[in-house]
Amino acid sequence: MDDISYTAQWTAAARALESERADGLIRDDYARHLAEPRGFELLDRYRGAAVSDFIAVRTRYMDDALTRVLGHTGIRQIVLLANGMDTRTHRLDWPEGATVYEVDHGALLAEKQSRLAALVVEPRVRTVPVKADLAGDWLEALKSGGFDTAQSTLWVAEGLVFFLTEQQVGQLLETVAGACPPESWLVVDMTSATLLRHPMTQPFLRSLREDGTPWRFGTDQPEEFLSDHGFAVRDLRQPGEAGAGAGRWPYAVTPREVRGVPRNWLISAVTKA
């Protein structure tokens, strides 16, 4: 498995631990199995950076946003971009007629499918794996899998854009925005540029670099960045706010007007006309 899949493993480990809490924000019964072999080891290595708390909050926000968008819009075409070892296709309720495309590295898709098959579990929705590198040209592979560019689409990009350059993120967003009609949706998380340079975050970021999975992109103006690349933000929250882990996030939520504070962004946006 390639380096980025180690990120998928420690993310699964965090979901497993959250699922085993009495007050867990999510329930993923398959996460512990998917976190092997290094997920818990790596998660322990990043202890102190609130990684587990963030993943729990992020996962719940995205689960809720996905459910809300599908319920309110009638969208039935969903694309999960680099969703790693997440099992939304197996653990969420899906509307009738929905199709989910999972776009990720071929080796990672195969590994996840093999592990889930060993558990004798089936997805709750029609699921189409698409082998592609999201840092390159991936849209043709998605179309070959049956993706219809004429259909309104819900895109989910969880834990992805940190690892890309600013140019790659912009290109990815523009590709997504141009691949479907206006008023299609994107649910995505981002970090702030301040977080990437703040002294408090450097031990965690150094560990990521040492493990071959550096964070490269962040923005302090997520609304403007998304607008520049084809999206209008409809909902933006920071961890700890209402609807984004209020009561569970270990830090105080600092008002946006206060500068120089590391932040994470949880975002729902629509493609612009």
Image (spheres, rainbow, N blue to C red):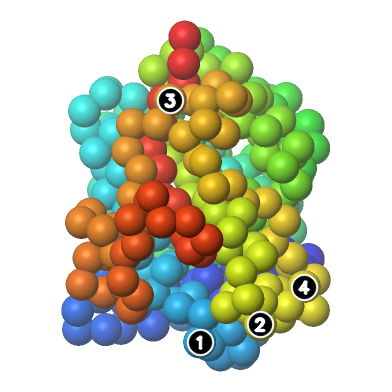
Q: Mark 2, mark 4: which one is toward the viewer?
A: 2
Inspect the image, locate mark 1, and give the three-letter code of the amino acid beneath it.
Gly
Say if residue 194 shows up in the picture: yes
Cα distance between the residues tagged 1 and 3: 34 Å
The residue identified by callout 4 is: 209
The residues bearing labels 2 and 4 have C-alpha atoms spaced at a distance of 10 Å
Q: Distance between the residues labelled 3 and 2?
A: 34 Å
Residue 147: image location, x then y, percent: 56, 24
Percent x, y of residue 271? 46, 21
Camera-side residue of 48 and 86: 48
The answer to whether residue 117 of the structure is visible from this angle is no
In the shown orientation, is residue 154 left or right of residue 85?
left
Q: Quote the CA–CA distance across marks 3 and 4.
A: 32 Å
Q: In which quarter of the image is residue 204?
A: bottom right
What whole-number distance in Å separates the C-alpha atoms at marks 1 and 2? Answer: 9 Å
Q: Pointers 1 and 3 in contact (CB under 8 A)?
A: no
Q: In which quarter of the image is residue 125?
A: top left
Q: Identify the residue at horizontal 53%, vertical 88% (top origin).
A: 47
Dot 1 and dot 2 residues touching (CB under 8 Å): yes
Labels 1 and 2: the sequence-earlier one: 1
Tag of residue 232: 3
Q: How far apart are marks 4 and 1 (CA)?
A: 17 Å
Q: Residue at x 35, y 75 (%)?
A: 251
- Which residue is at a point 42% across and 69% down the rendered structure image? 54
SS at badge 3:
strand
Q: What element carries label 4?
A: helix
- Kindly state the secondary structure of the residue where label 2 is placed: helix
- For label 2, the residue is 203
Residue tagged by mark 1?
48
Give the percent coordinates (x, y) of residue 57. Answer: 35, 64
* Position above or below: 55 against 42: above
